[in-house]
Image: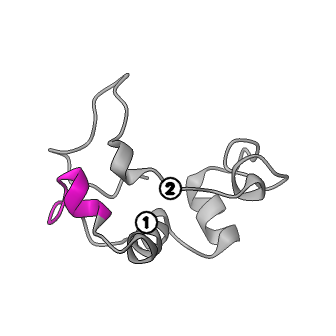
Amino acid sequence: MNLLSPEFRPGMSQKQNHWLTIPLTYEEHLGHMGLDTWSQGVVAWERYWGQTQIELLTEVSARLGYDVFEKAGVKGLLLPCQP
C-alpha cells in the first residue's frame, strides 16, 4: 500500500526515497511474522504489528527530532489513511 499521492510514487524498478525507510527489528523484518517472511501482505502485517507504515515513519521522525517527510520532499503529498 503506497500512501503517497501518485505524482510522487516511484515508477517500476525505481526505489523509494531513502528518507522514507522504516527501521525494523529482526522480528518485524525477518521473524516468523516478519514483512519479508510472511506471505499475507503489507496490510495484514500492519494489522498484526498494530501500526501502519505512515504511523511508524511518524514515530521515527519524532524520535529523530526532524521531519523525514520534509527531508524526502513529500510534505503535503500524503494521502489520507484508508481504514
Judge from the rendering whether residue 28 lies leftward or rightward of residue 13; answer left or right.
right
Res 48 quadrant in image: bottom right
Q: Where is residue 3 in the image (x, y as percent from the top left)?
A: 33, 58
Judge from the rendering whether residue 32 lies leftward or rightward of residue 1; answer left or right.
right
Which quadrant holds the C terminus?
A: bottom left
Residue at image coords 28%, 68%: 67
Furthest toward the top, the residue is 13
Judge from the rendering whether residue 24 lies leftward or rightward of residue 32; answer left or right.
left
Q: Where is residue 31 in the image (x, y as percent from the top left)?
A: 81, 51
Please say if 25 is above or below 51.
above
Q: What amino acid is labelled 2 in the image?
A: Ile
Res 24 quadrant in image: bottom right
**CA distance for labels 2 and 1:** 6 Å
Residue at image coords 17%, 53%: 73
User: Which residues fall within the magenta stretch?
Assistant: 68-78
Judge from the rendering whether residue 34 lies leftward or rightward of residue 61; answer left or right.
right
| Residue that label 2 marks | 22
Q: Is disc 2 in contact with disc 1, using a CB cutoff of under 8 Å?
A: yes
SS type, badge 2: loop
Q: Position of residue 70 (x, y in %)?
A: 20, 62
| Residue that label 1 marks | 57
Q: What amino acid is labelled 1 in the image?
A: Leu
Q: Is residue 70 magenta?
A: yes
SS type, badge 1: helix
Residue at image coords 64%, 61%: 44
